[in-house]
Amino acid sequence: MQLALRTPSADTVSRIARALMLPLIGLLVFLFAWHIAARNIDTSLGQFPGPAQVYEQTFGLIADHNRERGREAAFMERQEKRNAAILAKDPGAEVRMRDYTGKPTFIDQIGTSLITVLAGFALATLIAIPLGILIGLNGTLYAALNPLIQLFKPVSPLAWLPLVTMVVSALYVSDEPMFAKSFITSLITVSLCSLWPTLINTAVGVSSISQDLKNVSKVLRLPFMTHVIKIAIPASIPAMFTGLRLSLGIAWMVLIAAEMLAQNPGLGKFVWDEFQNGSSDSLGRIMVAVLVIGIIGFMLDRAMQLLQSRISWDKNAVVR
């Protein structure tokens, strides 16, 4: 028996080629324009870095990270040998392992920023979605809270950061804190600035539920929580995820700005430190950080888009 091989149609091949070629062409045009522009820009730190210099600095930063991890491994190994020698002489002796205190690398700063932004976004979501559902279902509560929402929504993270820093310093006092103050400060600042799109879009989505669904809920005499779970949330998912995607993008931008201003660990601090360093490699390293910030922001948005497509009840809806 011979198996019939299905060849893709010309239309399918055309769609695939279009999906791959157009982004590739756009990327190549961007790289060419960047290369030409960089050659004509001279700064106080030297020529503006082009794609080749950024490519070189990327691998330089990775090499720096690997060297630092090697130093850490050697440091821990020396401690283990020292402790083993102490215990060999006195089995009852108290030994301890000290943490490695080397300078965080670029890769370390990426991890720190990702943990902080996800924690801040999660806190903002836990506040915004329940509150958005409540004010979407209750017009009186919406009228009472809307002035406050409109008042605080446009406030810059640069305005929130000094206030949050002082409050955290005054209230978060512990000899052995579970989290660093810098982490708490960045987390709260991110949450305060990023919760508004989710809050507003959730409220709009809940308040826009069709009258037919409301009538079904009334006829069935659904309890409040059942109405929320079975009717309000599923019907408002598209608007809710629009808010979540906006909030996540804002959270990422706010975090970088907060880290630069407060000198909290993360990518923002890395950019500021390189700017202050003023070496011949600084501009290239800053450009690497800029591209990484953009790539991570894009990946976070795509992850949220994928989650929306999995959760949404309308599988035929176009998600962009």
Image (tube, grey):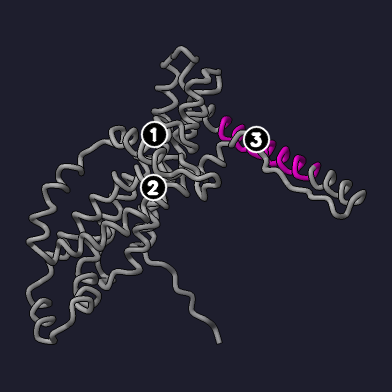
Q: Quadrant of the C terminus?
A: bottom left
Residue 192 position within the rendered picture, expressed as x and y whole percent measured from the top left: 29, 46
What amino acid is at disc 2?
Phe
Residue type of the residue flagged with mark 1: Phe
Residue that label 2 marks: 298
Secondary element at image label 2: helix
Q: Earlier in the sequence, mark 3 or mark 1?
A: 1
Most foreground residue, 260 or 211: 260
Q: Nearer the viewer, mark 2 or mark 1?
A: 2
| Identity of the residue drawn at 25% across and 55% down | 198
Q: CA distance from mark 3 to mark 2?
A: 31 Å
Drawn side of residue 159 relative to residue 207, left or right: right
For disc 3, the neighbor class at 10 Å (few under 14, some 14 to 19, many from 20) is few
Q: Earlier in the sequence, mark 2 or mark 1?
A: 1
| Residue 289 spot, x, y in % from top left | 47, 34
Q: What's the distance in space between the residues labelled 3 and 1, CA to CA? A: 37 Å
Asked if one can make out residue 46 in the rendered structure from this viewpoint, the answer is yes
In x, y percent, where is residue 310? 35, 68
Residue corresponding to mark 1: 30
